[in-house]
Image: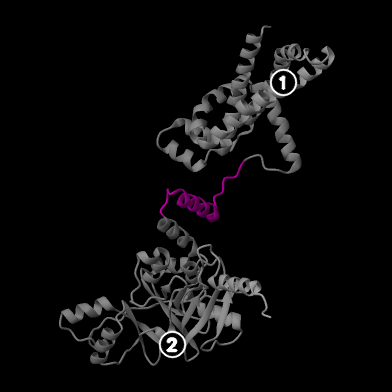
Amino acid sequence: MTLSESLLIIVALIATSAFFSLAEICLAAARRLRLRQMADEGDARAEKVLLLQEKPGHYFTVVQIGLNAVAILGGVVGDGALSPYFAAALQHWVSPENAQHIAFVLSFLTIIAVFLVFADLFPKRWGMNAPEQLAVRLVGPMQFLITALKPVVWLFTQSTDLLFKMLGMPTQREEQITSADILAMTEAGARAGVLAEREHRVIANVFELDTRMVSSVMTPRDRVIWFHKDEPEQVLRARIVAEPFSAYPVCEDDIDHVLGYVDAKDMFQRVLGGQPLSFDQGLPLRKALVIPDRISLTEVLEQFRQAHEDFAIVVNEYSLVVGVITLNDVMSTVMGDLVPPMDEEQQIVRRDDNSWLIDGVTPIQDVCRALSIDAMPQMDEYETLAGFLMFMLRRVPRRTDTVKWAGFTFEVMDVDSHRIDQVLASRPALSASGVPLSATAAQAGAGSSGSETPSA
């Protein structure tokens, strides 16, 4: 066999091995969601790839038969094709016997290197870049080979399935997508610029609804504006002007005895129609939806949907009112600054690059997001910034109390009847190199003092 014939055979074996390597990596890396989308768009080949992914035994058996056969033939042909030429070239420097041994090693390494690059690394990297597009192109030839080699494929597949059963391992791949998988994909899309950062934040907020409790976003009890059922019209009008909201609880004696709620739209219509704002003169009192304070925001949305309501009273295990929540509160959690709050007061106000003024009832998740803190200690023990301070201090905080965490100093600025109103979160200013300026100044001072020489 001449050198040109041997090289032609080697090229054909490399192409065959590359085909099987590409077929292997494409089927493994192809995403089912993308294949399903292609199948729904009318690509019948994508449906075939999906079926092969569900039962890939015969497919991978053919791949391994092809790869191993090519590897064996490549070694035989490559040794016979290149060894004589290497030996002839080496005989000028070493003995013929040593030349044969060295030629065998060089021929072996050359064939391995060529096959590794052109038959393995290159096709697999190509397949990882576009697995779905290549998988649908190769599914036809692979199905032909599966049919042509059916007896051999059946024998090896049955042997492999028997081994899986003996080891108690599943023979089919289970395709399960978790919320962590979706968040990872959206984060990768945001980093690649395919998904806007705000869209990524909205998706992440949706999955937070399962872990955030209703008490983290509700209006707390001491901030709820409620009406007494016997209050005169002048008082109602003054209260609405001073505290405009979308709905107001209506109580009998105190806030723990809720009779229902009045919608601001009903009151507005009566004012425009010249009708009196009085509950004993026709002002409609709606039945209030009552929900417990230990349910998640996802469950709140479901109860809103079932009751066809957008306002609810939140009670604790002792049937005491702890706050109220609206659909807008929940949507503000999902959409962030895309949905403005009903009132103008902001819970987190950035004063400068290194300090924030934060309301004590701000949800701790929002604090972590605003300050870019990964996590607080034992976050399941509290829900607000005030709860974090109480947890860390192990007592009710007083004015000027401070807590340090993750490079931030949280200082209590204002306390009203044991309730934390304002907290100042600050961090040391950073130099251009990212080092705190205080540390830089300290280092400079230490350096200057060390350079001084004592006077005589």
Query: In the rendered view, would you say 164 is above or below 222?
Result: above
Instruction: Label 2, secondary structure: give it.
Output: loop
Q: Nearer the viewer, mark 2 or mark 1?
A: 1
Residue 191 lies within the magenta run: yes
Give the residue number, with chain letter if any, for mark 2.
256
Is residue 52 visible to the viewer in this orientation of the structure?
no
- Residue 268 % position (x, y): 22, 78
Residue at image position (73%, 44%) is 168
Write the start and end of the magenta stretch as one range: 173-196
Residue at image position (55%, 69%) is 436
Query: In the rendered view, would you say 223 is above or below 142?
Result: below
Residue at image position (38%, 75%) is 346
- Residue 404 % position (x, y): 58, 77
Give the residue number, with chain letter if any, for mark 1.
72
Nearer to me, 209 or 303 = 209
Instruction: Indicate the quadrant containing the C terminus: top left, top right, bottom left or bottom right.
Output: bottom right
Residue count near mark 1 (Cα–Cα under 10 Å), binned few <14, some 14–19, many ≥20: few
